[in-house]
């Protein structure tokens, strides 16, 4: 039968009625203020050529991994890449997954056990939520970046559960929909005092913060005080895959019990060569500095244009302007896109109703003129009186 089941069709119709129906984009000729390619690595010919030359030098003429890593897919570039990642991220061990999504569902579905407790930030990424839902552990969300609210949840959770329960605290170093950052040092002190295990997703800080883009935890010098880190390569590094960083015993456990690792075909050699080449490029680029300059300029410009009150506070590459209502925010986005700038609306239910927004992703390759122009358009379309300092 070609028709959808009635329940599925009704869900589509409801989303369409709420002006929240997702569709694949068609235009890619706009000035980029929406992608995760923060430092331009995705289109780097140098990285592309280096990856290709690495394969030629190693005489690797193979398009696919041929199987899972536990069978035939653990080709030579895998242990070599993981050794490089261990050193680069100052970790005891590293395990590569096919994507950030695979890493998160693999970790959270297998590590917390029945009787354990998971406390996750209410704005945590969907892939972590999916992994948590697959876990046999009990899970609770706490208010965004609110350690006092977390403390109350833990006290209640421990009162009704065994004292032998492991407690996992889950947050991100930069949140994908708000672009803000928790007080990571305070989280670590809290976890040490309360004997909890801290897990941090560094997807949006890898390649952006710290020397050579090692991430925010390493920039702060606290990377070895967390139980596990998840760093992804599909954003600033411009390629594909992810790594879970932690102890050697954690790596061994994941190899044995993380189903998204055990039961999937490994990455092809070209993906591993690109991961290596991208990390080498991080050590010889000024793109991170250019990105940080653009972040500073963007923040200064929204202040001079009287837009600051509409934006969520952020020091990252992600900046969000709250424009309530799916129809309203889609209309503003469409008008900006018509002027040649790719700025995406984020709709409910992806974010809470009333918190719909335009999400500006900044890049090293955005010019200051482009930043000024797109913000001038925003100010015009949201009826903000501007006072631009030329």
Image (cartoon, rainbow, N blue to C red):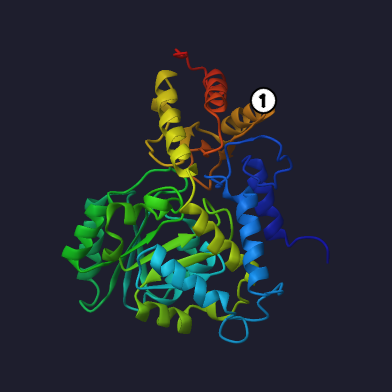
- Quarter of the figure that contains the N terminus: bottom right
The answer to whether 140 appears left or right of 28 in the picture is left
Nearest to the observer: residue 291 or residue 132: 291
> Farthest left residue?
193
Give residue 225's position: percent from left, percent from top: 26, 64
Q: Which residue is mark 1?
A: 339
> Farthest right residue?
1
Residue 259, relative to residue 270: is it above or below? below
Q: Is residue 313 visible?
A: yes
In percent of the image, x 49 and y 47: which residue is there? 285
Nearest to the observer: residue 220 or residue 111: 220
Give residue 211's position: percent from left, percent from top: 37, 51
Badge 1 crowding class, 10 Å Cα cut-off, few under 14, some 14 to 19, many 20 or more, is: few
Nearest to the observer: residue 53 or residue 220: 53
The image quarter containing residue 248 is: bottom left
Nearest to the observer: residue 208 or residue 200: 208
The answer to whether 23 appears left or right of 283 in the picture is right
Give residue 234's position: percent from left, percent from top: 55, 56
The image quarter containing residue 155 is: bottom left
Give residue 241's position: percent from left, percent from top: 55, 64
In percent of the image, x 65 and y 81: which residue is there? 67
SS at circle 1: loop
Residue 285, relative to residue 232: is it above or below? above
The answer to whether 98 appears left or right of 355 in the picture is right
Q: Is residue 142 visible?
A: no
> Farthest bottom residue?
71
In percent of the image, x 71 and y 72: which residue is there? 63
């Amino acid at each position: 039968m070609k028709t959808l089941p009635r329940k599925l069709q009704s869900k589509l119709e409801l989303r369409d009625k709420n002006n929240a129906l997702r569709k694949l984009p068609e235009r890619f000729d706009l000035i980029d203020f929406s992608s995760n390619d923060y430092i331009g690595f995705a289109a780097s010919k140098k990285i592309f050529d280096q990856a290709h030359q690495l394969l030629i030098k190693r005489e690797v003429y193979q398009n696919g991994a041929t199987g899972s890593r536990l069978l035939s897919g653990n080709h030579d570039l895998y242990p070599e890449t993981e050794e490089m990642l261990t050193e680069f991220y100052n970790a005891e061990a590293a395990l590569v997954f096919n994507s950030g999504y695979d890493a998160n569902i693999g970790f959270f579905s297998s590590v917390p056990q029945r009787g354990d407790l998971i406390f996750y930030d209410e704005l945590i990424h969907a892939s972590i939520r999916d992994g948590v839902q697959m876990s046999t552990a009990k899970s609770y969300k706490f208010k965004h970046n609110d350690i006092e609210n977390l403390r109350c949840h833990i006290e209640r959770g421990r009162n009704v559960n065994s004292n032998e329960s492991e407690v996992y605290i889950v947050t991100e170093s930069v949140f994908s929909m708000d672009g803000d950052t928790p007080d990571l040092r305070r989280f670590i002190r809290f976890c040490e005092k309360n004997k909890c295990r801290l897990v941090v997703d560094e997807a949006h800080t890898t390649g952006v913060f710290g020397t050579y883009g090692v991430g925010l935890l390493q920039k702060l010098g606290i990377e070895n005080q967390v139980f596990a880190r998840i760093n992804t390569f599909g954003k600033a590094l411009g390629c594909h895959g992810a790594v879970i960083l932690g102890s050697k015993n954690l790596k061994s456990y994941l190899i044995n019990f993380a189903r998204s690792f055990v039961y999937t075909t490994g990455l092809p050699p070209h993906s591993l060569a690109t991961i290596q080449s991208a990390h080498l490029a991080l050590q010889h680029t000024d793109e991170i500095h250019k990105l940080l300059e653009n972040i500073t300029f963007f923040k200064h410009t929204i202040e001079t244009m009287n837009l600051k009150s509409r934006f969520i506070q952020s020091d990252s590459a992600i900046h969000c302007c709250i424009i309530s209502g799916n129809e309203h925010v889609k209309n503003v986005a469409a008008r900006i896109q018509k002027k040649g700038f790719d700025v995406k609306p984020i709709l409910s239910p992806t974010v809470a109703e009333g918190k719909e927004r335009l999400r500006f992703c900044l890049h090293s390759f955005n010019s200051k003129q482009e930043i000024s122009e797109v913000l001038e358009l925003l100010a015009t379309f949201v009826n903000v009186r501007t006072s631009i300092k030329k």
